[in-house]
Image: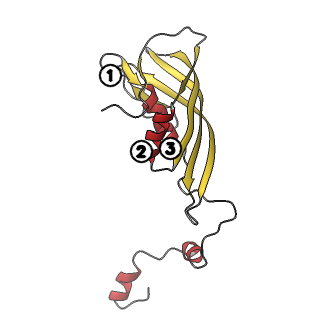
Amino acid sequence: MLPEFSRPQLLTDPPQAGVAEVLEANPAECAALADRFGIEALRHFSARYTRKPYPGGGLMLTGRIKAEAVQLCVVSLEPVTEHLDKPFTLVVLPPEATASEDPDGPDEIEADATGYFDLGEAFAEELSLSLNPYPRAAGTHLPAGLHEEAEEAPRNPFAKLAVLRGGKG
């Protein structure tokens, strides 16, 4: 089964100056992505990027993803609209390449043995990581008591053991 926003691409050599491209989800793809991510709606989703050669036969993609997502407020359950405009850098590795272990390096996508990779799915993953995990409607606050509990100092993990041994927790 193909992902909701599948855009298979073949790993090819772009000009040194790069090639500017745009991918945009249609309304059906937006609805399917919203369902996948468990949000109320995805009104718009697109990626504008430049494709440039990357050492070792890969590609470097730099650009921005833009989206308008509607999620429910974690406090009031009111719809909250979020406008995303996030930069990204992705590296597409050729089939024989080894992934980098640099945690500060760009995200990497591995092309399959035939040289194909799914750019739409990579952008969908970028979107899912960019969504606010705890959206709140303007002016909402957590109920009293919940907030205070969260700010308590963490307990010593060995406190219960100390009590069993006859000491203080």
The amino acid sitting under disc 1 is Asp
Residue for badge 3:
129
Q: Earlier in the sequence, mark 1 or mark 2?
A: 2
Callout 3 secondary element? helix
Q: Residues within 10 Å of mark 2 (few under 14, many from 20)?
A: few
Closer to us: 128 or 14: 128
Residue for badge 1:
112
Closer to us: 51 or 135: 135
The amino acid sitting under disc 3 is Leu
| Quadrant position of the C terminus in the picture | bottom left
Q: Position of residue 122 (x, y in %)?
A: 45, 32
Q: Earlier in the sequence, mark 1 or mark 3?
A: 1
Identify the mark at residue 33; answer none if there is no mark: none
Callout 2 secondary element? helix
CA–CA distance between discs 1 and 3? 23 Å
Q: Residues within 10 Å of mark 3 (few under 14, many from 20)?
A: few
Residue for badge 2:
36
Query: In the figure, residue 147 lies in which quadrant?
Result: bottom right
Query: In the figure, residue 156 lies in which quadrant?
Result: bottom left
Query: In the figure, residue 67 lies in which quadrant?
Result: top right
Q: Nearer the viewer, mark 3 or mark 2?
A: 2
36 up-or-down from 2: above or below: below
168 up-or-down from 157: above or below: below
Residue 129 in view here: yes
Outermost residue to the front: 28
Q: Earlier in the sequence, mark 3 or mark 2?
A: 2
The amino acid sitting under disc 2 is Arg
Closer to us: 144 or 60: 144
